[in-house]
Image (cartoon, rainbow, N blue to C red):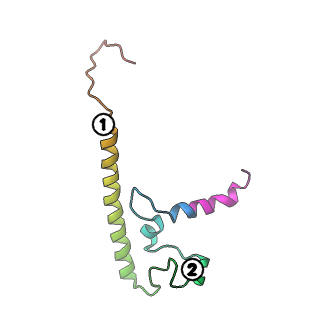
Amino acid sequence: QSNWVQLLPLVEFAINDSWQESVQAVPFVLNYGKRPHLPLDKLLKGEGRLDVPDCVSATDRAESILSAVENAKAALHAAQQRQAVAANRRRREMNIAVGDSVF
């Protein structure tokens, strides 16, 4: 691949506009309170991703973002707990004394 300079911004956009299971949200929504507008959205007005009206007050937008971030924190904590349970299933208690041979 020789055109990474052109492709990386598109990849970054795609990742930031995709559902992230660990935080149960889309990163753009956590940062800005809404999904980004795409050029196609103007053509699909009402059918696309325009789910947040443009005339939302700053206070409402800030409260929406704070709520989304709190939900993401809770979802991230739950994901960490699930991952810890899965990882600890294979772990076992080991008693090692000084002088024991270990691998």
The reply to whether discs 2 and 1 touch (Cβ–Cβ < 8 Å) is no
- Identify the residue shown where x is 51% and y is 81%: 47
Q: Main secondary structure of the magenta part?
A: helix
Q: Position of residue 86 (x, y in %)?
A: 33, 42
First reached walking from the N terminus: tag 2 or tag 1: 2
Horizontal and vertical percent for residue 36? 52, 73
The secondary element bearing badge 2 is classed as helix
Question: Is residue 10 located in the magenta-colored stretch of the structure?
Answer: yes
Quadrant in which residue 23 is drawn = bottom left
Residue at image x 34%, y 39%? 87
Q: Residue furthest bottom?
A: 55
Residue 26: % across, % down:
45, 65
- As drawn, 36 above or below 101: below
Mark 1, other Cα within 10 Å: few <14 / some 14–19 / many ≥20: few
Residue at image point 48% right, 73% down: 35
Name the residue at 38% across, 72% down. Answer: 65
Q: Secondary structure at mark 1?
A: loop
58 or 69: nearer the eye?
A: 69
Height in image: 87 above or below 82? Answer: above
Residue 84 lies left or right of residue 27; in this view the side is: left
Frontmost residue, 80 versus 86 = 86
Where does the C terminus fall, quadrant-wise? top left
| Magenta highlight range | 1-12
Work out how far the residue at label 2 is from the one at label 1, CA to CA, in angstroms: 47 Å
Label 1: which residue?
89
Give the residue number, with chain letter if any, for mark 2.
41
Q: Is residue 34 magenta?
A: no
Judge by depth and name the residue closer to the eye, 102 or 98: 102
Label number found at residue 32: none
Amino acid at circle 1: Arg
